[in-house]
Image: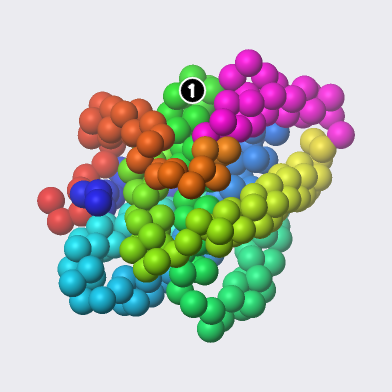
Amino acid sequence: MSDLVVRRLLIDLEAPFARHWCGGDAFRTALFNALSMSFPVGEQFFIDSVRNGLKALPPELQDKYRAEVQGFVGQEATHRRIHALFNGHLEKQGLVNDWEPRAKERMKLLDGLDPRHHLGITAANEHFTAILADWMLANPDLLASSEERLRTLWLWHSAEESEHKSTAFDLYQALGGNHEWRIKWFRRITTVFLMDTLRQTLNNLRRDGTLWKWSTWKSAASYLFGARGLIRQTYKPWREYKRADFHPRQLETSLSERWLADNASRYTPVGA
């Protein structure tokens, strides 16, 4: 179990930001904008899945996980609110969020299913966000030329995603979720997540007018497949999830702890 702290980020997201806020790079900006567009609806699904998973446990196990679930819900609700503000600026810039309505339609297909299915989906998504988070925390210089408040936003979000990466997984296991269905959902979510990310990123670039620029594709190749590329460095931890004895805590955790300790002035614990 994890001791999860809910934090209020001390940045101003009311003021607008530049169209290519990620160091002036069109591709990196479009990619992160795409991910942000998925967060409000996705994180609400994760919140509901974990809450319902807790309710499905026998009373003695509910007591064991209650505090962690409350922390998870608080962190994800804060992420949802912050990214909704972020996405509001994207809408004013003329970008259109096609991912969210598509995700909402898919979620309707899950109504009435055993809560372990929702937790299996959540655990798979949390693995994706955790390995992305750890990669960002290991390569913070790749955001170094970005606007400082937005760099803080993404690294704070990364630190908390790494921090609570095992909550849904542990609830799935506690409810007797098996390895076979965990991997089935992981494979499905891999396809859905990658296709949705690609589709929304391309849509963002098209609306931005930078889709067919050489600099855009050069940046994409380097950022995804270069020596420190996102896909190149996250493939191994992605693959680890398929092991029968896998647990999220086997992955890196020190980077999250270090960032939160070194940047304590950038947030305040809720209730402190």
Judge whether 126 appears above or below 111 on screen. Answer: above
Q: Report x, y in % for residue 52.
A: 38, 74
Q: Which residue is mark 1?
A: 139
Task: Using the image as rendered, state which of residue 236 and residue 84 is in the foreground.
Answer: 236
Q: Amino acid at mark 1?
A: Asn
Judge whether 262 appears above or below 124 on screen. Answer: above
Q: Report x, y in % for residue 121.
A: 53, 61
Task: Using the image as rendered, state which of residue 265 and residue 79 is in the foreground.
Answer: 79
Decide if residue 136 is on the left or right side of residue 170. right
Q: Quadrant of residue 224?
A: top right
Q: Report x, y in % for residue 104.
A: 62, 71
Q: Residue at x 26, y 76 (%)?
A: 58
State the residue lying farthest toward the top. 227
Magenta region includes residue 232: yes
Decide if residue 207 is on the left or right side of residue 113. right
State the residue lying farthest toward the bottom. 112
Decide if residue 198 is on the left or right side of residue 56. right
Decide if residue 120 is on the left or right side of residue 269. right
Q: Residue at x 60, y 72 (%)?
A: 107
Element type at mark 1? loop
Q: Quadrant of residue 239?
A: top right
Disc 1 residue crowd, few under 14, some 14–19, many 20+, Cα 10 Å: some
Q: Main secondary structure of the magenta part?
A: helix
| Residue span colored magenta | 212-237
